[in-house]
Image (cartoon, rainbow, N blue to C red):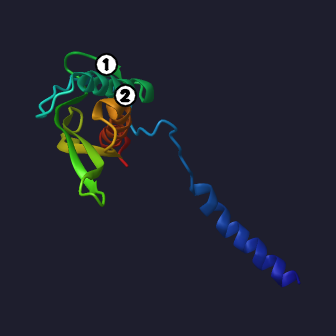
Amino acid sequence: MVWTNKITRLLLLLLLPLCMSCSISYKFNGSSINYDKIKTMMISDFPIRADYVYAPLGTKFNEDLKDAFIRQTRLQMVKRNPDLSIEGEITGYNQYNEAVNSSGYASKTKLTLTINVRFVNNVDHKQDFERQFSAFRTYDSTQLLTQVQDQLIAEMTKEITDQIFNATVANW
């Protein structure tokens, strides 16, 4: 019995430094920005370069993207000489027939939004990129696009702004 207690104590003494050396760190906003080095950001308005133009789309996307960074980071938005810069354009806003019913007509329509993004990190240019982000939603073809468009744009814009946020400052 004495021998078992000594082994238990020895194991505890060996495991204690191991447990103390481990730590868990959480950032509730999802960003991993070193605020000692990165303090400013510039987000340019994204013009619509898609074949199909729905004017409210540009405004909605631009506001949502800026709002995501303002809400989730402490970066100061500037017009010149930023530490981080995001610019790009809305390159695709398309709808396609996705499913056909037994009568041969489309039963589902797929709406796709594509955004081209150029990200520049003036503190660490190894993180710079140009990439396309996209999202889609499917809706019933018995509905007109004008009936569902604003809701679908809100959903797709949220999804794409999250993708851009994660690719630029979350480093997932």
- Most extreme residue toward the front is 103
Q: Amino acid at mark 2?
A: Phe
Write down the residue under mark 1: 77
Write down the residue under mark 2: 69
Q: Dot 2 surroundings within 10 Å: few (below 14), some, or many (20 or more)? A: many
Image point (52%, 38%), residue name: 28
Residue 124 place in picture, x, y as percent: 23, 38
Relative side of 115 to 73, left or right: left
| Rendered-image quadrant of the N terminus | bottom right
Q: In which quadrant of the rendered view does residue 114 lie?
A: top left
Residue 41 in view, yes or no: no
Secondary element under disc 2, as helix, strand or loop, is: helix
Residue 157 place in picture, x, y as percent: 33, 34
Residue 150 place in picture, x, y as percent: 34, 29
Q: Are marks 2 and 1 in contact (CB under 8 Å)?
A: yes
Q: Is residue 153 above or below residue 101?
A: above
Image point (40%, 40%), residue name: 32
Q: In which quadrant of the rendered view does residue 142 lie?
A: top left
Residue 161 in view, yes or no: yes
Image point (26%, 51%), residue name: 106
